[in-house]
Amino acid sequence: MNYHVLTLFPEMIENGMNTSITGRAIAKGLLTLEAINIRDFAFNKHQKVDDYPYGGGAGMLMQAEPVYLSYESIVNRIGKRPRVIFLTPQGKTFNQNMAKEFALEDDLVFLCGHYEGIDERVLEEIVTDYVSIGDYVLTGGELPAMVMMDSISRMVPGVLNNQESGETESFSGNLLEYPQYSRPEEWHGKKVPEVLLSGHHGNVDKWRREQSIIRTAKWRPDLLPKADLTNKEWNEIRR
Ligand code: ADE
């Protein structure tokens, strides 16, 4: 997977991504990352990238041309037109299925906006996907781009090792993950649930499944209609 990030703050992207699991994956060559400074494509005296909006209103807009040229520099280098994700609260809300789908691409471009937004005309020309990471407003698209790259990277083969690998994790079957415990067996007077010490894998699996369902019903009941529960499990919840 090759990530190309168009941004006014490349160091934010580089620092964030070259850390922890994504950093390890970049070092191994499973991911590549280039953070391209849109300002490098502003060919005016002060390398200005923003201007006032026509029609008036608060704030400044990122101008079309530097954004377009920075994108074209990628296209010319890699010889194809990859999907371009624009991070915006107006986009479709990001989820695990979208992470899996984007992980199938070879190249992804993330366009990070700042100020009050970006001139609509360049968005019309280059953006293929408008994505939001939730119903709140951030100061720029860099954090959302990193959120997306983090979760997409987990779906790229080889990025997670066996221990980190995520078959039974939250959202895999639209259920939240069960609670987990490590040593010591008792901490602050709280004991690890007996079943987990039993060594009986069948009972452990059953307990974990029940806990996942209880948790989901309590914290994310909106997920339950999409979870594949047996009739018996549905009846248990209703009791
Ligand atoms: N830019 C500002 N807020 C955002 C959000 N919630 N999601 C994606 N991009 C954004």
Image: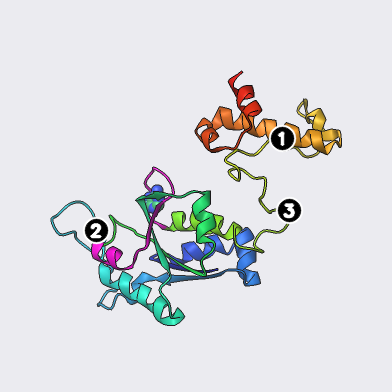
Q: Does any portion of residue 95 appear in the rendered image?
A: yes
Q: Amino acid at mark 2?
A: Met
> Is the residue under label 1 in contact with that under label 2 (CB below 8 Å)?
no
> Is the residue under label 2 in contact with that under label 3 (CB below 8 Å)?
no
Q: Amino acid at mark 1?
A: Arg
Residue at x 62%, y 72% (from the top left corner): 29
Ligand 1 lies under 8 Å from the Cβ of mark 2: no
Q: Specify start and end residues of the magenta stretch as a single range.
A: 120-141
Crowdedness near tag 1: few (<14), some (14–19) or many (≥20) residues, C-alpha within 10 Å: some
**SS class, disc 3:** loop
Q: Spatial distance from mark 3 to mark 2, Cα to Cα?
A: 47 Å
Q: Position of residue 232 (x, y in %)?
A: 65, 26
Residue at x 32%, y 76% (from the top left corner): 69
The residue that mark 2 highlights is 60
* In-image side of 201 versus 180 (left or right): right
Camera-nearest residue between 72 and 114: 72
- The C terminus lies in which quarter of the figure? top right
Q: Spatial distance from mark 1 to mark 3, Cα to Cα?
A: 18 Å
Tell whether position 124 is magenta: yes
* In-image side of 53 versus 99 (left or right): left
Residue at x 64%, y 23% (from the top left corner): 236
Residue 208: mark: 1
Residue 163: mark: 3
